[in-house]
Image (cartoon, rainbow, N blue to C red):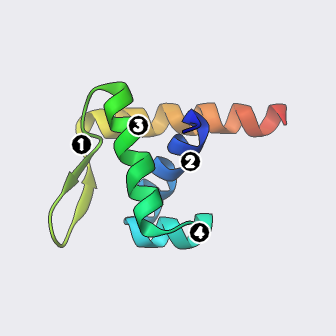
Amino acid sequence: MDRLDCMRAFVATADLGGFSRAAAKLGLSRAMVSKRVAELERDVGTRLFNRTTRRLSLTEPGRRFHVQCGHILGLYASAE
């Protein structure tokens, strides 16, 4: 999967507070957003979200990574 697509899914999930909301924004299924975030977590080697049945929150590494992804995606959008 494309790393930028995974970062977009991660940022949308963090910004909107859930996989379903991110999926609606991105025009993807909830399962696809979850899969992209899971792939990104594997690639970076750490959990980015704390998940419970009712809550989703960023881990400390997730908060730091969210800031960096925002910068990267902003630069990419400017370059396009």
Q: Position of residue 48 (x, y in %)?
A: 30, 41
Of marks 3 and 2, the one in the foreground: 3
Read off the residue under disc 1: 59
User: Which of disc 1 and disc 4 is earlier in sequence?
Assistant: 4
Please tell me which residue is depicted at 39% across the width and 39% down the height of the picture: 39
Tell me the CA gap for discs 1 and 3: 14 Å
Of marks 2 and 1, the one in the foreground: 2
Q: Position of residue 71 (x, y in %)?
A: 60, 33
User: Which of disc 4 and disc 2 is earlier in sequence?
Assistant: 2
Q: Quadrant of residue 61?
A: top left
Tell me the CA gap for discs 4 and 1: 23 Å
Binning the other alpha carbons within 10 Å of mark 3 as few (below 14), some (14 to 19) or many (20 upward) gives many
Read off the residue under disc 4: 25
Please tell me which residue is depicted at 84% across the width and 37% down the height of the picture: 80
Would residue 31 be found to the left or right of residue 78 on screen?
Answer: left
Q: Please, what secondary structure does the residue beneath circle 1 have?
A: loop
Tell me the CA gap for discs 2 and 4: 11 Å
- Disc 4 marks a residue whose amino acid type is Lys
Q: Please, what secondary structure does the residue beneath circle 4 have?
A: helix
Q: Position of residue 51 (x, y in %)?
A: 19, 57
Would residue 42 be found to the left or right of residue 26 on screen?
Answer: left
User: Which of disc 3 and disc 4 is earlier in sequence?
Assistant: 4
- Disc 3 marks a residue whose amino acid type is Leu
- Disc 2 marks a residue whose amino acid type is Arg
Read off the residue under disc 3: 40
Q: Position of residue 47 (x, y in %)?
A: 24, 38
